[in-house]
Image (cartoon, rainbow, N blue to C red):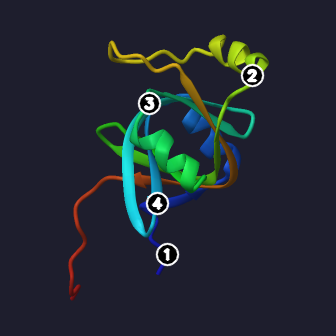
Amino acid sequence: MVDESVRVLTPDQAWDLLGGAQLGRIALSVDGQPDIFPVNFHATDGRIMLRSGEGTKLSELAVNSRVAFEADGHTETDGWSVVAKGTARILVSLHEIEAADQLPLRPWIATMKYNYVEIAVDSITARRFEFGPEPERYPV
């Protein structure tokens, strides 16, 4: 039986959804210990950009640059989720930082977040979900 309430989307559809979203989560892992952080972001051209202050995210990225990223959204009738995996790096060249400064990516809270992190995505998946009542466990 095919579950028609869940639809697998194409990579292009996944990027379109990310292009309209602003809040996601970056998942990191160091020494077998997972961590996840909410971040605002900008997605374009096969990459996801975010800003970060000094601290845990940057320290963990220095140890393990492999990350997962998730964003989602919903209306009253449906929802979606995008999961991307890739390699993150902190931008260091003045040229890259100046280019990143031109992106529509500003901190949401009044904190200093002068570090740009770029995730080069090598896999992306997405699903769209139609909301509805739970089916009967044991249909007659």
* Amino acid at circle 2: Glu
Q: Which residue is painted at 33% across and 12% down in the image?
A: 110
Instruction: Please tell me whether mark 2 or mark 1 is closer to you in this view.
Output: 2
Of marks 3 and 4, which one's residue comes earlier in the chain? 4
Q: Residues within 10 Å of mark 4 (few under 14, many from 20)?
A: some
Residue 32 picture location, percent across and down:
43, 70
Distance CA(mark 2)–CA(mark 4): 26 Å
Of marks 4 and 1, which one's residue comes earlier in the chain? 1
The foreground one among 108 and 60 is 60
Distance CA(mark 3)–CA(mark 2): 19 Å
Above or below 72: residue 103 = above
Residue 78 picture location, percent across and down:
37, 45
Residue 53 picture location, percent across and down:
44, 27
Q: Residues within 10 Å of mark 1 (few under 14, many from 20)?
A: few
Callout 3: SS: loop
Residue holding disc 4: 29
Residue holding disc 1: 2
Q: Is residue 134 left or right of residue 92?
A: left
Q: Which mark is residue 81?
A: none
Distance CA(mark 3)–CA(mark 4): 17 Å
The foreground one among 14 and 70 is 70
Instruction: Please tell me whether mark 4 or mark 1 is closer to you in this view.
Output: 4
Callout 2: SS: helix
* Amino acid at circle 4: Ser
Residue 43 location, quadrant: top right
Residue holding disc 2: 96
Residue holding disc 3: 54
